[in-house]
Image (cartoon, grey):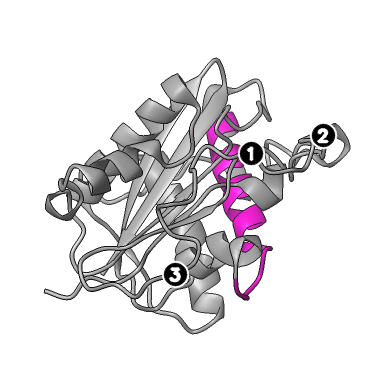
Amino acid sequence: MRRTLLSLVGLSLLLACSSQTIFVDGPGAPADTNDAAVDPTQSDPDSGTKPKPGQDSSITPDPMDSSTVPDTSLPNDGFDQFQHRNLDDINKYRAGKGVAALKLDTKLCTFAQAGSQQLTQDHTPHQHFINASNNNTLWSSGFTSSAGENQGDPNGWTVLNNNATTNELMQIDAIQLAMYNEGPGVGEAHGHYMNMMNAKFTRVGVGLIEVSGHLYLTNDFSD
C-alpha cells in the first residue's frame, strides 16, 4: 500500500515556542527537505514572548455566549462533548470552504489521547507520533494511507474560564480558530490549516487532557 506524506504540525507560528513543521516519510512517500532528519525538538528562533491567540483577558469570550454552552443533544456514540466540540469546530471551517465533514474515529482518538498524555509529560511536540513512526506501530494505530497531526501548546493552552466545562470548550474553540486563521499556503506557517482542511482526510482522532486547567490537545487525521 502506498502511504503518503505524514504532516506533523506544532503550534509554533501561533505560540512562538519550541515547535516546527516536521515531515516523516511513510513507505513510498515523496521525499521532502524538512523530513525526519530534522531535529523535532529544535526550537523556533523566536523568543516565545508573543501572546497566545485568545488569551488577552480583554477579549475573553462571554462564558454565557451560546458558543460555550455545553451541548446536551450529543449522539450516544462513545465520544464526549469536548471531542464533539473539537470535531464540530473543524467541520464548521471545512463546510465554509466546501470540504466534506470529518468523522470521529475510535482508534485515532485512542492514539491522539496517548499523544496528549505524552505531551503533558515531555512537552515535546509530536514525539508520540514520531515514536510510533519509528517503531512501525503508526500504521496499526488507526491510520491508513495518510496521516497528519496537529497539536496545541506543548505546555498546555492557558486557562480561559474558572468553570471547568466552559474553560475546556473555550480552549478548544480558541485553538481551532487560531489554526484556521493561519490560512492556506505552503510551509509551517500554514500547516495546521492545511491539515484541518485537507479534503483527503475523512477521519479525525481527538485527544484532550486538562492539567490544572491547561488544555493539551492532539488531533490526528487520516483517510
Q: Is residue 89 above or below residue 153?
A: below
Which of the 4 image quarters holds residue 24? bottom left
Q: CA distance from mark 3 to mark 2?
A: 30 Å
Using the image as rendered, state which of residue 58 and residue 146 is in the foreground: 146
Looking at the image, residue 192 sits to the left or right of residue 72; the answer is: right
Crowd around label 3: few <14 · some 14–19 · many ≥20 (10 Å)? few
Which mark is on residue 32? 3
Residue where numbered disc 2 is placed? 49
Q: Is residue 142 magenta?
A: no
Q: Looking at the image, can residue 72 be seen?
A: no
Residue where numbered disc 1 is placed? 43
Looking at the image, residue 169 sits to the left or right of residue 121; the answer is: right
Question: What's the amino acid at mark 3?
Answer: Asp
Which mark is on residue 161? none
Sequence-first tag of 3 and 2: 3
Q: CA distance from mark 1 to mark 2?
A: 13 Å
Question: What's the amino acid at mark 2?
Answer: Thr
Circle 3: element type: loop
Q: The magenta stretch spans which residues? A: 167-186
Sequence-first tag of 1 and 2: 1
Q: Residue furthest right?
A: 58
- Please state, as top left, top right, bottom left or bottom right, where the C terminus lies in the image: bottom left
Using the image as rendered, state which of residue 77 and residue 116 is in the foreground: 116
Image location (x, y in percent) of residue 117:
36, 27
